[in-house]
Image: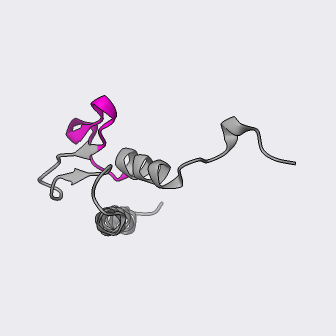
Amino acid sequence: MSEPSETRVTDPERLLREEWWANHGCSPAGLYGDDGELQCNATTVHRPLDFRRDPLTDLYAVVQQLRLARAAAAWTRACETPTR
């Protein structure tokens, strides 16, 4: 039995790029998504990123670095919080 067409993933690369753009960790103020663009211009955090055109390997490296930094910061905060 096949899936209904509306639930089938037709372009996994596009979906991955959109997910990384929306959830890579920068403030919405740095994101630009008009006209189908997927850009982040938060230059204090990383170089300008074009999630539609940059190679996936480059985007992966930046997204992974940002996510690991956020996880490390959360771990540090958790370790510094006194327990009751």
What percent of the width, then of the height, locates residue 42? 17, 48
Q: Relative to 35, is 81 above or below? A: below
Which residue is depicted at the point 70% across and 38% down?
Answer: 5
Look at the image and give the residue range highlighted in magenta.
24-38
What percent of the width, then of the height, locates residue 27? 26, 42
What percent of the width, then of the height, locates residue 83? 45, 63
Q: Is residue 18 magenta?
A: no
Q: Relative to 59, is 16 above or below? A: above
Image quarter of residue 68: bottom left
> Which of 53 and 39 lies nearest the eye of the viewer?
53
Image quarter of residue 34: top left
Which residue is depicted at the point 30% across and 30% down?
Answer: 35
The furthest residue to the top: 35
> Which of 67 and 71 lies nearest the eye of the viewer?
67
The furthest residue to the left: 44
What percent of the width, then of the height, locates residue 55? 31, 63
Instruction: Please indicate whether residue 18 sits to the left or right of residue 26 in the image.
Output: right
Which residue is depicted at the point 76% across and 38% down?
Answer: 4
Q: Relative to 60, is 52 above or below? A: above
